[in-house]
Image: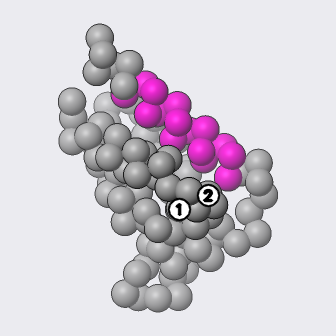
Amino acid sequence: MTDYEKKFIEFYTKFSLDSDSAKEKFETYANELEYAYSLSQSLMNSELKNEWNKIWSELTLKPPYDENHPFKSSISRSLYGKRKKTIEYYLLFFHTEYNRIKEKVIK
């Protein structure tokens, strides 16, 4: 299992078990998400890397308001006003990626 896969599984396990709303979970796990994203940049699969880049750029579209927590504050501002369908898209991507990694590990 690669570092990316380990970190993503760790992130997604915490993220999916948290009972907060999706927006709150994005803020809570912003640092873990940022780390998984940074590791995704070393992936050989360009389609997966491009999908990560798209989602990350949408989640960090707005500038941070708190320099002590730049990713959390940027994600918080970027998610404000996002449609439910967009957030569902992010959640589906994470769930699909989790399943892809788990299937790979089982084989």
Circle 2 crowding by C-alpha within 10 Å: few under 14, some 14–19, many from 20 = some
Provide the residue designation for mark 2. 22
Q: Is residue 46 visible?
A: yes
Q: Is residue 74 above or below residue 53?
A: below
- On the rendered structure, is 101 left or right of 59? left
Residue at the image point whose x is 52% and y is 31% from the top: 96
- On the rendered structure, is 69 left or right of 73? left
* Residue 93 on the magenta segment: yes
Q: Is residue 41 visible?
A: no
Q: Is residue 40 above or below residue 20?
A: above
Residue at the image point whose x is 44% and y is 72% from the top: 71
Label 2 residue SS = helix
Range drawn in magenta = 87-101
| Nearer to me, 18 or 31 | 18
Quadrant where the N terminus is found in the figure: top left
Residue at the image point whose x is 43% and y is 40% from the top: 49
Circle 1 crowding by C-alpha within 10 Å: few under 14, some 14–19, many from 20 = many
Provide the residue designation for mark 1. 26
Q: Are marks 2 and 1 in contact (CB under 8 Å)?
A: yes
Task: Tell me which secondary structure the magenta stretch mostly adopts.
Answer: helix
**Quarter of the image where one finds residue 30:** bottom left
Rendering coords of residue 89 (x, y %): 66, 43
Q: CA distance from mark 2 to mark 1?
A: 6 Å
Rendering coords of residue 76 (x, y %): 58, 74
- On the rendered structure, is 104 left or right of 64? left
